[in-house]
Image (cartoon, helix red, strand yellow):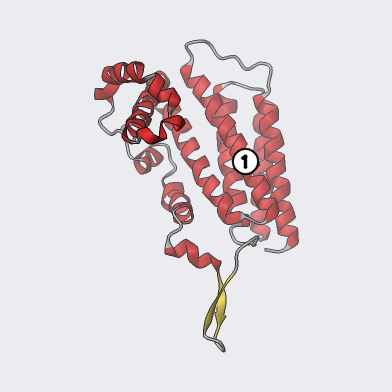
Amino acid sequence: MDKNQHKIIVRHLKWVDKFAYEVMSDSSIRIGKKDHGKALLFLQVTKLHTSTEAVLELVKKGYGMDAMIIARSMLNNLISCKWIIDSKPKTGAKRFIQYNTVLRKRFLDIALKYPEQKGHFLKVLTDEKEINSSYKKIERRFSDKYSWSGKKIWKMAEDVGLKWDYDFIYNLASSLEHSDINSLNEYLAGIDHANKLFVFKGGPTSRYVMESGITSIKYMGEGLELFIKIFKLNKNCQKRLLGFASRVSATLKKD
């Protein structure tokens, strides 16, 4: 990737970052006390926006592989957003919120397992009785304690039309996140045959800069598209987002 391509990706990331802030600051947005679906959508898209800003900083400095790991997290966000909206929003949102009790119970069990580390778990230890009481009330609803929806992430992705993203992006980024041998090979710069040595190189690189940037733009854009639709924002927002998508698409075709 040449310097001009790098500048274009950074420029696109900056645009979607600024646009996201503008859209989410719209004064017409209203969320009722019982409208958990909209509240969760706002939170999820807020996280997408924050992740986009993190990717922007990493991409600017040439840390595309680390940015790709954040892009994977953004896919998780998007899958949850779409799954809650596509299922019954009230039911999906309620289940998502209730899953917090499962998580708190898990951390409580860890805290009790390692009493010598109790200083790190003061909050859950203080709330031990409340957590156990709340957990008993919802335990049967979560047969899979590692899935808030009751489904595997690949199935959720399939349900909301993101199966390709799971199969390709999620698995590719998972390789980087888990530092398996395939991802570690990215740090192999070459082989010094004369001295029979492998040459390794860390630090900034052009690897995955384009991929992480475009992937993050895609997921931020899809999150904003959903946000604009659910909150029924000005139609001009949708037009501007579509125009931006066309510009990004044109950039990819040139490459």
Q: Position of residue 179 (x, y in %)?
A: 46, 57
Residue 88 visible:
no
| Quadrant in which residue 15 is drawn | top right
Q: Is residue 179 visible?
A: yes
Q: Position of residue 160 (x, y in %)?
A: 42, 37
Counting from the top left corner in percent of width and height, residue 24 is at 65, 26
Relative horizontal placement of residue 199, taking residue 145 as reference (left or right): right
How many numbered markers are drawn?
A: 1
Look at 71% across and 64% down and name the residue there: 2
Amino acid found under the numbered disc labelled 1 = Thr
Residue at 28% in and 28% down: 142
**Residue designated by label 1:** 52
- Identify which residue, 78 or 104, lies in the foreground: 104
Extreme-top residue of the structure: 33
Q: Position of residue 136 (x, y in %)?
A: 26, 19
Q: For the view shown, which residue lies furthest in the bottom direction?
A: 194
Which quadrant does the C terminus fall into?
bottom right
Residue at screen point 61% across, 36% down: 50
Query: Measured along the vertical axis of the image, is residue 175 above or below residue 37?
Result: below
* On screen, residue 207 above or below 106: below
Q: Farthest residue to the front: give it.
A: 116
Describe residue 82's horizontal placement relative to residue 253 as left or right: left
Q: Secondary structure at mark 1?
A: helix
The quadrant where residue 244 appears: top right
Instruction: Give the position of the N terminus as an image quadrant.
Output: bottom right
User: Residue, x 61% and y 44% (percent of image)?
Assistant: 217
Near mark 1 (Cα within 10 A), the count class, few <14, some 14-19 or many ≥20, is many
